[in-house]
């Protein structure tokens, strides 16, 4: 008998929203990736001026010293390092790039992995991100209100800017967790017709080495990265 009501049409908007969250994370990860170029230039300049002292002396005797002093450059290096990694955390979770020490989990079926991921998100990852978001916001606001800058006389000012990326990066990671939670919900509890669609989006669950599963579909890992290429 054909059911009067079907949950299937409701599941696809949920998956579409999860895709939207993934695209946002991918955009900011790409922005972070481009920051590698100025980071390389700063490091090269810093190394060259250390080897050729006369260049450093020329800079020190010019107006440029107020903007590219050695202290400012060194602080900018670790600022850029932090921003690059904080913007990439969310996308790294989507593609399964974070280190996992899970000897037991890797030998389980896809649905068991899905349950493990679901419980880990609800009980561990989301509460941790929530606490970090709250405290990093207070951390940033305090730095802004106090006009916090570098402890060095010639260092960078406005330290609230770099501190705000801790809040922003963690918020992106929370968005990635929410997106994955929605996909896991569809995969574990949704109609069988849409489970393969959800599974294709779960790169950290649907691994090539996994045992056969009733909902297993081919080339799912490649499709789970569709919004990143």
Image: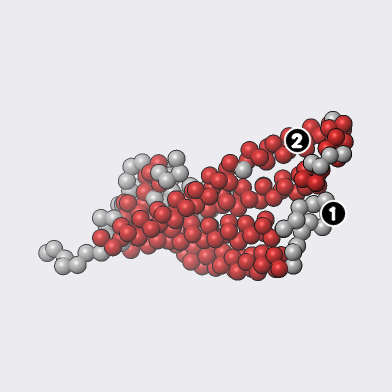
Q: What element carries label 2?
A: helix
Disc nearer the start of the sequence (1/2): 2
Q: Residue at x 82, y 57 (%)?
A: 151
Q: In which quarter of the image is the N terminus?
A: bottom left
Q: Can residue 163 be seen in this view?
A: yes
Whole-percent x and y of residue 87?
A: 57, 51
Q: Which residue lies furthest to the left in this view?
A: 1
Q: In which quarter of the image is residue 163?
A: bottom right
Whole-percent x and y of residue 142?
A: 70, 68
Q: Quadrant of the C terminus?
A: top left
**What residue would you read off at disc 1?**
153
Answer with left or right where residue 117 lies relative to residue 75.
Answer: left
Answer with left or right where residue 38 lies relative to residue 30.
Answer: right
Q: In which quarter of the image is residue 195?
A: bottom left
Identify which residue, 30 or 187, lies in the foreground: 30
Q: Can residue 112 be seen in this view?
A: no
3D distance between C-alphas at marks 1 and 2: 21 Å
**What residue would you read off at disc 2?**
45
Identify which residue, 227 or 94, lies in the foreground: 227
Q: What element carries label 1?
A: loop
Q: Which residue is drawn at 32% across and 51% down?
A: 197
Answer with left or right where residue 7 lies relative to residue 209.
Answer: left
Are the residues at dot 1 and dot 2 in contact (C-beta closer than 8 Å)? no
Whole-percent x and y of residue 22?
A: 45, 52
Within 10 angstroms of label 1, few (less than 14), some, or many (20 or more) residues? few
Q: Which residue is drawn at 32% across and 59% down?
A: 13
Q: Which residue lies furthest to the front in this view?
A: 63
Whole-percent x and y of residue 207?
A: 43, 46
Within 10 angstroms of label 2, few (less than 14), some, or many (20 or more) residues? some
Q: Residue at x 62, y 57 (%)?
A: 165
Answer with left or right where residue 31 lies relative to residue 68.
Answer: left
């Amino acid at each position: 008998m054909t059911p009067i009501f079907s949950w299937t049409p409701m599941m696809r908007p949920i998956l579409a929203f999860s895709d939207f969250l993934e695209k946002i994370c991918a955009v900011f990860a790409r922005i972070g990736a481009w920051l590698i170029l100025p980071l390389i230039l700063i490091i090269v300049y810093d190394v060259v001026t250390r080897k050729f002292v006369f260049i450093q002396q020329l800079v020190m005797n010019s107006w440029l010293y107020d903007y590219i002093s050695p202290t400012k450059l060194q602080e900018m290096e670790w600022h850029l390092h932090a921003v690059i990694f904080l913007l990439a955390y969310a996308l790294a979770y989507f593609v399964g790039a974070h280190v996992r020490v899970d000897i037991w989990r890797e030998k389980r079926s896809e649905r068991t992995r899905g349950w493990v991921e679901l419980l880990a998100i609800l009980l561990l990852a989301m509460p941790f991100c929530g606490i970090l978001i709250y405290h990093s916001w207070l951390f940033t606001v305090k730095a802004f209100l106090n006009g916090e800058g570098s402890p060095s006389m010639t260092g960078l000012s406005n330290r609230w800017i770099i501190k705000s990326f801790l809040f922003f990066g963690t918020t992106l990671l929370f968005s990635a967790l929410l997106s994955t939670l929605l996909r896991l919900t569809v995969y574990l509890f949704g109609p069988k017709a849409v489970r393969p669609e959800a599974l294709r989006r779960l790169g950290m669950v649907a691994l090539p080495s996994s045992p056969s599963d009733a909902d297993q579909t081919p080339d799912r890992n490649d499709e789970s990265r569709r919004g990143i290429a």
